[in-house]
Image: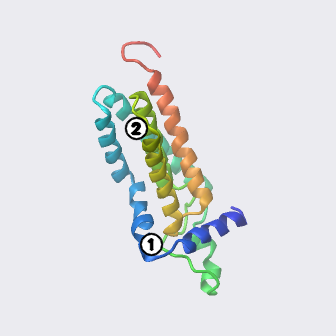
Amino acid sequence: MTELDRQLFLVINHGLNNGFNDLWIGYATWLGYGWISYPIAILALLALGKRQFWTNTLVLAASAIIGGVALHVVKNAVHAPRPLTVFASDIAAGKVYVNVMFERLYENSFPSGHAQVAFTVATVLLWAFVRAGKLKWWSAAIILGVASLIGVSRMYVGAHFPSDVLGGAVLGSGTAIGCCLAIGRWKPGRPG
């Protein structure tokens, strides 16, 4: 973690902090929970059409499982401290204030699980929209905008540093791209 990482965290955590942003940035963090994001993604895949629904859902499930396992392996291997731990002495001395919404977290910061889920869902949805021939610039902007908002929300609520969010985004997108490529090439009844 660099000084830039700490300073950018404080800019987002303090600079955006107000009651209105609590409503739309703070609560956007809930969309990073798999039990919320994955059902919404399944409904979006169903809305794209029944023709590719099961393949798209298989890609989403594989991406969720592989990404989730990879996330926990990396979190436990790195065991990075969260902002409340990093700034603990400065908080105690009254030099730094960390805005915390929801639970107070202290360990296993890298990578962000919410960002991993958000970018897994975003990547699979973009892939599915492209396959269906229905991707428009505005739909891509909405999908990536929501995923990015979830990432920013993790800093806003005091849970993660920017590098944690970036790591989660790369992990989620990377595992999803791998699953899209692997499963997208597979055809039932034909080898490989």
Label 2 sits on residue: 60
Q: Give the x, y percent position of residue 94.
A: 61, 87
Q: Residue at x 27, y 29 (%)?
A: 50
Would you say 125 lies left or right of 174 here?
A: left
Q: Which mark is residue 101?
A: 1
Disc 2 to disc 1, C-alpha distance = 29 Å
User: Residue farthest to the bottom?
Assistant: 93
Which residue is nearer to you in this view: 137 or 97?
Answer: 137
Q: Which mark is residue 182?
A: none
Kind of residue indicated by mark 1: Met
- Residue 76, visible in the rendered structure: no
Q: Give the x, y percent position of residue 19.
A: 43, 76
Q: Is residue 86 above or below residue 164?
A: below
Q: Give the x, y percent position of residue 190.
A: 41, 12
Instruction: Please rate how many residues cluster around mark 2, counting C-alpha atoms within 10 Å: few if below 14, some from 14 to 19, many from 20.
Output: many
Q: Residue at x 55, y 39 (%)?
A: 174
- Residue 165, visible in the rendered structure: yes
Q: Give the x, y percent position of residue 73.
A: 54, 48
Disc 1 element = loop
Q: Residue at x 42, y 28 (%)?
A: 131
Disc 2 element = helix
Instruction: Please rate how many residues cluster around mark 1, counting C-alpha atoms within 10 Å: few if below 14, some from 14 to 19, many from 20.
Output: some
Sequence-earlier tag: 2 or 1 = 2
User: Residue farthest to the front?
Assistant: 137
User: Residue farthest to the top?
Assistant: 190
Which residue is nearer to you in this view: 21 or 77?
Answer: 21
Kind of residue indicated by mark 2: Leu
User: Residue farthest to the right?
Assistant: 3
Would you say 78 lies left or right of 172 here?
A: right
Label pair 2/1, CB-CB below 8 angstroms: no
